[in-house]
Amino acid sequence: MILNVDLASEVPLYQQLRDQIVGAIADGVLTEGSSLPATRALAADFGINFHTVNKAYDLLRQQGLIRLNRKTGAVVTRTVPDAPFRAEWTARARTLLAEAVAKGLPADEVLATCRSLLDSFGATQPEDTP
Amino acid sequence: MTVAITLSSVLSALVLALALVLPSIASPTVPFGVRVPAQRADDPTVVRQTRAYRRRVLIGGIIAAGICVAIYGVTGETLLLPLTVLALVSVWYGCFFLANHEIRAAKAAGSWYEGLRQGIAVDTELRTDPPRFPWLWLAPALIVTAATAVIGVILYPSMPAILAVHYDAKGVPNREAAKSVGAAFSLVFVQIGVTALLAGIAAAIFRTRPDIDPAHPLGSARWHRQYMLLGARALLGLVAVIDLAMLGSSLLMWTGTVTPWAPLVVVLPILAAVLVAVVVVSRNNRERDGGEEDTGLTHRDDDKLWRGGMFYVNREDRALMVARRFGVGWTLNFGNPKTAMLFAGVVALFALVIILRLGG
């Protein structure tokens, strides 16, 4: 898996790392049991502080997406969307959709974008699509 | 004497040839050790400096070689001949630095990095699924070393009482030692030391941090994997040839053979192997991008970590070896305390060899 961070971005580095790992899980590049490098090894490869990587891994661990192991680094785990997650995710999706509506994006376009994004995740993951 | 002249000429020609082709095999986005954005790789300044560099290297090289030959003609001192090679390397670095300086100035004046998004790319699979050390390629070196030791043990009773441990440039032994295990097996110890050192470096290559281009990370990561494997194999092939040369030299010593071409037994195979290794690695030096879509990111400007465009000094970086930015292969991080320890180790190894050979 390639992790590519933008140093000039307003999004903090740990957030970029976390987002890209989540994206890789959705894409099917990382599957259950896939391992991620140890914190220090990844930080050394980026030439960034290891606390930054630690923060990214910690966010993923809190969401139950990875399991941390002192020796082997991190391993992607299987998760089920529980009720608190659904509620929190819906709230965030609401904000994103509200932005689109506030900016005047037509509903059709918003739906089409959502559909194509969801399909793009399935592209690398064999899945039944309608 | 002719041997020394031939060797110095061959070495000088090699240095000159390497200096002339280097701009073509080095990464196009790091012309003369200056990091430039991909769209500036063919900037008029870069093109002009490449041409000027080649002209300077050629003229400077010919002048340096001419002066050294003239000094030799006057003094007749063969010791001065390796100086030609040293002078050429200095000329080369001078030309490199001039080009580096000009391109750096143009880059600063034109703000080449303004408005670009600089990024860093990492391939996590290099850590979670690293390329395997090519153990099979280490086998020839180990077999040759073991064979040398076995042949030595068998021949030991029949060896001459006085062993020639050093030859002058004409192939005449100029230092001898009474037969002893230390003197007879001195080259076996060299074999063991060199094999361990180069195998260690080959293993270290796999732990180096690859410099992945954030604009084309997938192709770049694939290429790095291949490059590491190639570099390790080239080193292990080289150490096998060095061990073989030591075997040849040991056989001459053990059988008491005196020939004018004794130094060639050591130097020629090693020189040939170095040449082959350099050609093989440099042929694959330029990354090929496999039509991968540009991510819009540019490699970050890391010029300040490369002193004089060539020496990597970064105290914050725990890495010991990093891929060279200009040229072929890898270089050391001179900001890392481990580099100093490594140098001390190599010096100690040489000292040990000298003491063994003199004291044997």
Image (cartoon, helix red, strand yellow):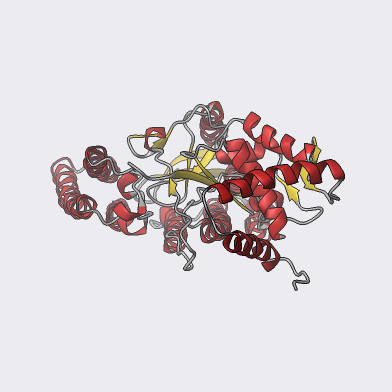
Q: Is residue B44 above or below residue B93?
A: below
**x, y percent for residue A14:** 62, 36
**x, y percent for residue B130:** 67, 53
Question: Residue B262, located in which quarter of the rendered image?
Answer: bottom left
- Residue pushed farthest bottom? A130
Pick the front one: A31 or B182? A31
Residue at figure coordinates x 53%, y 40% from the top left: B321
Pick the front one: B16 or B348? B16
Asked if residue A76 lies left or right of residue A56, the reply is: right
Question: Residue B94, located in which quarter of the rendered image?
Answer: top left
- Is residue B322 visible to the viewer in this orientation of the structure? yes
Pick the front one: B219 or B309? B219
**x, y percent for residue B234:** 53, 58
Asked if residue B177 lies left or right of residue A87, the reply is: left
Q: Is residue B95 above or below residue B274?
A: above
- Is residue B160 visible to the viewer in this orientation of the structure? no
